[in-house]
Amino acid sequence: MTQPIGATLPAWTARDLPPTEPMVGRFCHLVPTDLEHAANLFAAFTEDRDHSNWTYLPYGPIENIDSFTRWMRARCTAADPLFHTIIDNVSQLPVELASCLRIEPTVGVIEVGHLHFSPFLQRTPAATKAMFLMMKRVFDELGYRRYEWKCDALNTPSRRAAERLGFQFEGIFRQAIIYNGRNRDTAWYSIMDQDLSGLSTAFEKWLAPDNFDSNGGQRCRLESFR
């Protein structure tokens, strides 16, 4: 055969679905989302006074706890998306939602999404640690091949976050979906299994206690360790 083809994968087998065991780190831990988290999550999300955290999500703003609880019951209790609540280790309070979605065990692909970082977790080591814990579960624990991040192409903070965490830009899918009555061009990013070793070293160096001053400020940026 003279036609080019992809590399053969004779040892590949379908992987397991993500488990529901907690993911535990120094700054935070992740547990399966439960309706018991609703009150604390809603309180954390209401700290976003101008509702800007909801702009690029396909739902919300959700204005009251009853509506939020109904939304959680309808959207956050399925196997895919598999939602996790991120709990801050200092306060022991739920402060963020994140999920694994579009889970494809037969080909080893998972997307991270439905990220809702409350003001309590934004730009903190806990936020970075949470993303690292999810990444390590996908690759180290489950042996998946590809980890995806997708967002509205106009969502500059999300795109910067993806790049900071080591996701590689793959392009724009124009007019990919309609949400909230608006067009969305979708920016695609990914990390491959072979990328994890170098990224893990960078995350561990950045998260090390000596990379933070007495006020909790970072001494070196995460990107500087890659």
Image: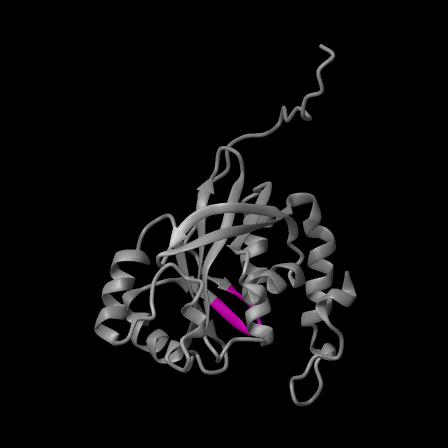
| Vertical comparison of 123 with 139: above or below | below
Q: Quadrant of the C terminus?
A: bottom right
The part of the image, by quadrant, that contains residue 160 is bottom right
View extreme (bottom): residue: 215
27 is within the stretch colored magenta: yes
Instruction: In the rendered view, tell whether residue 22 sits above or below residue 188.
Output: below
Q: Is residue 191 magenta?
A: no
Q: How is the image coloured?
A: one colour
Q: Quadrant of residue 118?
A: bottom left
Using residue 68 as the reference point, say whether residue 219 is left or right of it. Answer: right
The residue sitting at 74% across, 65% down in the picture is: 223
Counting from the top left corner in percent of width and height, residue 149 is at 55, 53
Residue that appears at 30% across and 76% down: 39
Residue 138 location (% of width, % of height): 55, 49
> Against 172, is 133 above or below?
below
Q: Is residue 97 left or right of residue 27?
A: left
The residue at 54%/38% (across/down) is 108
Q: Pick whichever, 108 or 89, lies toward us.
A: 108
Query: Residue 194: image x %, image y %?
Result: 70, 44
Region rendered in magenta: 24-29
Assign the N terminus to one quadrant of the image.
top right
- Residue displayed at 28% across by 66% down: 35
